[in-house]
Image (cartoon, grey):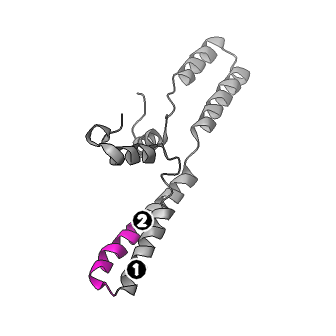
Amino acid sequence: MAVYDKYLTGSLAENYRAALQDTDALDLSEELALMRAKLAECLEQNNIKAMPAIVTQIRKLSEAIGKNIENARNYIPVSMLGLVVDEVARLVGVHVKDQNVVGQLRSALGRIRLPANSREARQLDRAVREGEVPGA
């Protein structure tokens, strides 16, 4: 269950659930376009009072989009991590002659818990950057 799900009702709850299922949720370009359209509307209506708040929202969205693009460049898909773990296990089996060591390494590699989603991937990334050893 999502965090706010139990508090929302009606169409707001339906829209919330639909947004959670959106695979393009990190793509904020539509929101940015909407805010730019809102800013253009304010300019047309000479609504100067509303403009600073809209410009601030546009700046924040632009920064978030930049961070999302940078994060996308730095993350390895979970499916690829699984392939890496499998390949490491295969290489250990080929190059390590002591079968007890091979078994221990394969067992340890098999216990590696890969992130299930982007949120868990970000948490794992943060933990590694802060020097924490996941699963220790």
Report the mark closest to the observer, 1 or 2.
1
User: In front: 48, or 61?
Assistant: 48
User: In front: 56, or 121?
Assistant: 56
Indicate which disc residue 124 carries: none
Residue 39 locus on image (x, y percent): 39, 78
Q: Quadrant of the C terminus?
A: top left
Dot 2 corresponds to which residue?
61
Element under disc 2: helix
Q: Quadrant of residue 95?
A: top right
Inspect the image, locate mark 1, and give the three-letter code of the amino acid beneath it: Glu
Dot 1 corresponds to which residue?
41
Residue 28 locus on image (x, y percent): 47, 60
Overall secondary structure of the magenta stretch?
helix
Part of the protein shown in magenta: 46-60
For residue 112, above or below residue 53: above
Does the magenta segment cover residue 47? yes
Element under disc 1: helix
Q: Residue at x 35, y 38 (%)?
A: 2
Can I make out residue 26 in this image?
A: yes
